[in-house]
Amino acid sequence: MGPVAGVTRIGDGVFRVDVDGRSEIVYVTGPPGDRWAFWNGRTYRWTGAHRETEAGSGSRRRHIAARMEITAPMPAKIVAIKVREGETVKSGDTLVVLEAMKMELPVQSPSDGRVRAISCREGDLVPGDAILVELE
């Protein structure tokens, strides 16, 4: 089991996240089911769809199908795609390598998950905030 995080709401859309004795500020905006989080110079998008399924003895369970869209932090060229659709990734794994301002920038997975979709190809020029990879 990984580290446990403590989350404290300190204002509208502002949260303090405490992990392993370190505090970080995370800004969150957007309607339910389409949240945007801004942390440490990166932007993350979470969209969730709820569906109810029948469980035994007439009760219902709610399952959340979540996906996270990983976006380009700035206009860039796609140098390499390091994952394939359906592949399982760990937090910190490099998903895509970008080139901007004569520097290579690895785009890493913010959490464990599975690659749902890849929305770019090597050689593409993408604008800032372009969706590169969707995780679930």
Image (cartoon, rainbow, N blue to C red):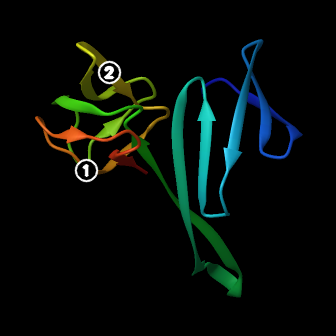
Quadrant location, the N terminus = top right
Amino acid type, mark 2 = Pro
Q: Residue at x 84, y 46 (%)?
A: 12
Q: Residue at x 46, y 36 (%)?
A: 112
Q: Give the farthest residue toward the left.
A: 123
Residue 82 in view of the camera: no
Quarter of image, res 100? top left
Q: Is residue 43 above or below residue 49?
A: above
SS of the residue under disc 2: strand
The answer to which of 123 and 107 lies nearer the viewer is: 123
Q: Give the farthest residue toward the right.
A: 10
The answer to which of 50 and 107 lies nearer the viewer is: 107
Residue neighbourhood size for the residue with mark 2, other residues' Cα within 10 Å, grouped as few (<14), some (14–19), many (≥20): some
Amino acid type, mark 1 = Ser
- How many marks are shown on the rendered structure? 2
Where is mark 2, residue-wise? 106
Residue 29, image x, y percentages: 68, 50
Query: Quick check: 114 left or right of 19?
Result: left
Q: Residue at x 12, y 36 (%)?
A: 122
Where is mark 1, residue-wise? 119
Residue 116, image x, y percentages: 32, 53
